Amino acid sequence: MKRMIFEMETADPDDFMTLLWLADHPDVELLGVLVTPGSEDQCRLIRWGLDRCGRAEVPIGALHGPEWWATSEGKKARVSGFHQACYGPGILEHPAGEVAGGPALLAELLREPDATVLVGAAPKNIGKAFKDVPGLRLARWVQQGGFAGDNLVAEPLEKFRGRLTCPSFNPGGAPRETLALLASPQIGERRFVSKNVCHGVVYTEAMREALSRRVSGRSPRSGLTRMIGALDRYLADKGVGKAMHDLVAAACALDERVCDFVEVEIYREKGEWGARAMEGTNTRISVGFHEERFLDVLAR
């Protein structure tokens, strides 16, 4: 049983798909959900998902806290239109319930430091928590994002061929926090699921059929059913499959054999991110992907 805390955002639909997948997973003890920036509509959506998966007890932490909701920035809509189209307008009317400050909640949850913090967003909650609480310790941080270039990846995606560095949305959204967390001796293990790997994982019709075969003949749990339904809806609406960035990272958090990892130093150069082989960093980045194992993990 993996003890996990999930930090997410809601602009890209795959964060919420990942939350649904994690919420009632039989091999996951979901300790809490952190959201950036933490608006009321985001918290309503998250509570709706947790309630639908029978996880009403899981606490929610917002980066800026509920007092921010009344500000002009806090009133801005943060939930993408796809969420409303897929899950219905009721998601934004669902009571958010109690919402804590995200960094403070994380510090509380890490009193027992054997957890994994999985981040599908800019690492702002985790970054602020480590800044605010000097003695904080964490067993493992799994971050979606970063970049492994031609120096590490034997078969790079064509659009990244020839590159050693590249912009990366999540660490780029909190560069100081990312670099501080990379340097922290209080984090036992760091895993980055890089864009040069996860950008090639797209929910196609063939993948849909392969996943359907794996869940056929049994009653899938609510979170898995809703996740598959959302992927199907995206494919039907857009005509192209959803890139599964955060789901790949979540699968790796549960079973690292989904990807091949190498130990590296992750660095930032001229606003872009790169990685170079280096021992002793306790930081590994993905350089390869195994689709069959990913689907096996996803179907649990």
Image (tube, rainbow, N blue to C red):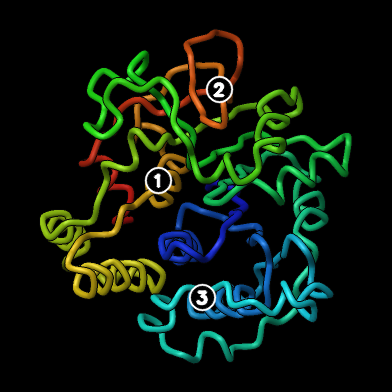
Q: Residue, x 57% and y 40% (percent of image)?
A: 172
Instruction: Check whether the beta carbons of the residues at disc 1 and disc 2 lie within 8 A of each other.
Output: no
Local secondary structure at mark 2: strand
Disc 1 from disc 2: Cα separation: 22 Å
User: Which residue position is annotated with label 2?
Assistant: 266
Residue in the foreground of this view, choosing between 294 and 82: 82
Q: Nearer the viewer, residue 161 or 199?
A: 161
Residue drawn at 88 percent across, 42 percent down: 133
Between discs 1 and 2, the one toward the N terminus: 1
Name the residue carrying label 1.
251
- Give me the residue at 64% from left, 62% from top: 35
**For mark 3, what is the residue?**
49
Q: CA distance from mark 3 to mark 1?
A: 19 Å
The residue under label 1 is which amino acid type? Ala
Eye-nearest disc, 2 or 3: 2
| Residue in the picture at 65% in, 68% down | 58
Q: Earlier in the sequence, mark 3 or mark 1?
A: 3
* Residue that sits furthest to the front in the current view: 270
- Amino acid at the residue labelled 3: Gly
Q: Position of residue 42 (x, y in %)?
A: 60, 73
Q: Give the amino acid at mark 2.
A: Ile
Circles 2 and 3, Cβ within 8 Å, touching? The answer is no
